[in-house]
Image (cartoon, grey):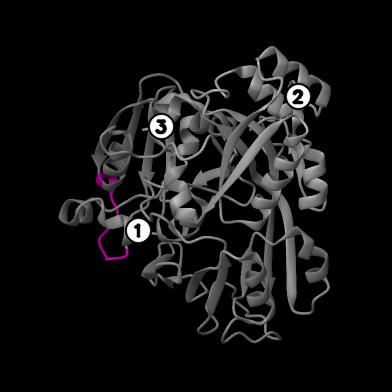
Amino acid sequence: MHWHRRLSLLAVLVIMALIVAACGTTAGDDDDVTPSDPTEPTGPSVVRVGVGADATNLCPRKTTDVASANVINLVYAGLLVYDENLEIVPYVAKEIEMPDDTTYIFHLHEGVLFHDGVELTAEDVKYTFDTFRDPEFGARNIAFYDPIEEIIVHDPYTVEFKLAYPSAPIIYYLYAGIVPKHIAEEKGDEYFETNPVGAGPYVFEEWVANDRIVLKAFDDFFEGRPRIDEIVFRPIPETVTRVVELETGGVDAIDDLPPEDVERLKGVSGIDVTIKPGTGFEYYIFDHLTDPWSDKRIRQAFAHGLDRDAIIEHVYFGLREVAHTPILSTSWGHNPDVPKFEYNPDRVMELLAEAGYADGFSTTIGLSESPTRREIVEITQYQMEDYGIDIEILEMEWGAFSAAAVGEDFDGCIRGWSGQTDPDRGLYRQFHSSNWP
């Protein structure tokens, strides 16, 4: 079976980004000294980041998970980049022309170097996006690039994207990291999966699976050498351990702070807690080619039976909000007036009876190792018992779960989907059949 025809999003929770950093633990920094020129490094510095999962694939065309993107976004540089206001702005491209509604012409900065010292040119841009568009290559975001009819190199620093039809969202998808064509031709595209080479601010140093990924500052980065000399990503799946590592100085920052620790850590000297609106959501998906999920009424019953406000209160301590659409409140395309599946136990029983499941049914839900998601599923399991729906929980480590989630290992699963800025991305990547290889 093909999951591109059987995905059904039923319930979503907005993720609010939680970034937690220990102050003054960066090696070589003086807490009391502010450098006169913030663009210049003040001395050797290392930042160790505790993350919830290890990366899975470091090729920017073949992965979509956050753990991999954390690394990819530092190693690679794209034509464009999102700024702090989530607006798309030039990056490797210094200027963009649009002579008509189906043509984009990008003029590149000269002297942008890959980490091996070879200059990035229009040929690398063409190669990167041609492979994105090649069905045999297997890029995860292939559907984003459907509008592109042809990519033309005019000279080393000018590349034209000719579209088959006008497409406003295409500009939002040209941020993808550019890969060096010469290395791909010499070593094969698979090389980048474990040995990324880009033109971004950091050079890939090493990857010890489930232990660390080390990045070093790129001296010849075209926007100037980064102030931080080294970034180390440490996968620490257990959230309690991740928090302890932060408090004891084992890491300098962590992501995905447990909501129950937010207020406590706000009062800990030397630790900063930053909370900002996020660009992603948590959601359930089910195999709707398999009974009983093939019946829309069953999916609607599940949505009406899930008390998401209770989940937010008990799991997230009020630090999330219910999302009724995958186009989030942080997106300019958000519409708060869409039809909603409100919590309604009576309607659940009506729908189950109409679908021929008045006595309920049994199903399986998978998840990656995450105390928070396990708690969500356990609450869901408890809530669904009232309707005779028996849920078996299948938990596995992230790599195995990621592979299983596109197979037939369980009837449904809980996942997260981030980076929802333009509304097209919030819908097309997740739901359009052409985007599932």
Magenta residues, start to end: 115-123
Tell me the residue that label 3 is attached to.
Answer: 436
Label 2 or label 3, whichever comes before in sequence order: 2
**Do the residues under discs 1 and 2 have CB atoms within 8 angstroms?**
no
**Do the residues under discs 3 and 1 have CB atoms within 8 angstroms?**
no
Q: Which of 91 and 68 lies nearest the eye of the viewer?
A: 68
Residue 147 image-quadrant placement = top left
Amino acid type of the residue tagged 2 in the rendering: Lys
Q: Position of residue 218 (x, y in %)?
A: 40, 70
Tell me the residue that label 1 is attached to.
Answer: 198
Q: Which of 322 and 162 lies nearest the eye of the viewer?
A: 322
Q: Position of residue 148 (x, y in %)?
A: 35, 28
Label 2 neighbour load within 10 Å: few <14, some 14-19, many 20+: few
Q: Which of 252 and 364 lies nearest the eye of the viewer?
A: 364
Is 148 above or below relative to 57? above
Q: Which of 259 and 68 lies nearest the eye of the viewer?
A: 259
Amino acid type of the residue tagged 3 in the rendering: Trp
- Residue at horizontal 39%, vertical 72%? 219
Is 68 above or below relative to 169? below
Amino acid type of the residue tagged 1 in the rendering: Gly
Q: Is residue 120 left or right of residue 10?
A: left
Q: Could you tell me if residue 113 is visible in this image?
A: no
Q: CA distance from mark 2 to mark 3?
A: 27 Å
Mark 3: secondary structure: loop
Q: Position of residue 339 (x, y in %)?
A: 74, 20
Tell me the residue that label 2 is attached to.
Answer: 340
